[in-house]
Amino acid sequence: IASLVVEGQIMRVFVHHALKAAQPDLAIIDGEAAISGLRMIKSAEEIAALREAIAISERALERTLAGVRAGQSEAEIEQALVQALFAEGAEDHAFRPIVAAGDNSARPHAKARADYRLRPGDALLIDFGARRHGFCADITRTVFLGHASDEAQAVYDTVLQANLKGHAVTRAGITAHEIDDAVTAVLEASPFADRIRTKTGHGLGREVHEAPYIMRGNHQRLPAGTVFTDEPGLYRIGGFGVRIEDDILITETGCVSLTSFPRELQVLEC
């Protein structure tokens, strides 16, 4: 073998070293760009698998939220969520869930705590997804316990409007830059612009993070069949965060949200 094409972002370093040690003249070529381009446009079967993973995730989230009460820890809720995912038919979780309440919800990639107990007024951010037939769901919803303050309601509405802007502008041929620019502009025009911490989203399929990356500066045009996450958020460090994430399928005439779980502000009894 003179050359070998590999997925550069996935190949482990020790495998690379072993191949070169066994065959020093072997040309190892990073085929990431070609492979990600092929993966980006989903077939009907792949879209069906994504729909199934998302439906499982939404049923699991509904079950989990029904049991949330003040006094629980984030870790307890995470455990209940994972159990619900498997009970609903997941092969695995697509990634370790993010279950974050109170000030932890202001950390975009928080880890669940065992020593923090949920309190009335807390934001509870849950970012998670099932894996089904090898394909990943990725959904985020933020709810509040007992009541939502005026600030919480205003922040939530801003994030919701940004999320809906992503739905509204998406169509075949749009660039990743244009989607992120439209979504982020809603956040930037609000009184909470200093709370922006992340880009709008990323591609979704066999990997939970894959091309295209929905960010300013990425001028890649997105064809019909692309699936990506629309996940604007606002995060006040030391306070709380809100993120709303949907999985979006680009079509020839616009887009379809594969996610159907309610986006409106939810306040849970506690």
Image (spheres, grey):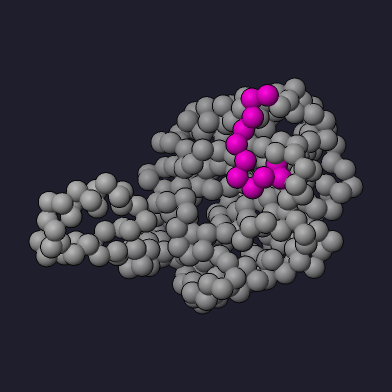
Quadrant of res 229: bottom right
Please state if 19 lies on the left or on the right of 1 as rendered: right
Please state if 93 lies on the left or on the right of 11 as rendered: right
Does the image show residue 23? Answer: yes
Residue 88 in the image: x percent, y percent? 50, 32
* Magenta stretch secondary structure, dominant: loop
Q: Is residue 112 magenta-colored?
A: yes
At horizontal 45% and vertical 58% (from top left) the residue drawn is 210
At horizontal 29% and vertical 64% (from top left) the residue drawn is 30
Residue 126 in the image: x percent, y percent? 64, 40
Quarter that holds the C terminus: top right
Of residues 94 and 197, the one nearer the viewer is 197
Of residues 6 and 13, the one nearer the viewer is 13
Please state if 66 lies on the left or on the right of 258 as rendered: right
Please state if 50 lies on the left or on the right of 66 as rendered: left
Does the image show residue 77? Answer: no
Q: Is residue 27 magenta-colored?
A: no
Q: Is residue 171 above or below residue 6?
A: below
Quarter that holds the N terminus: bottom left
Residue 99 in the image: x percent, y percent? 63, 36
In the rendered structure, which segment of residues is drawn in magenta?
Answer: 105-115
Q: Is residue 2 above or below residue 54?
A: below
Residue 90 in the image: x percent, y percent? 45, 36
Q: Is residue 29 above or below residue 139?
A: below
Q: Residue furthest right?
A: 150
At horizontal 89% and vertical 47% (from top left) the residue drawn is 150
At horizontal 83% and vertical 35% (from top left) the residue drawn is 121
Q: How many marks?
A: 0
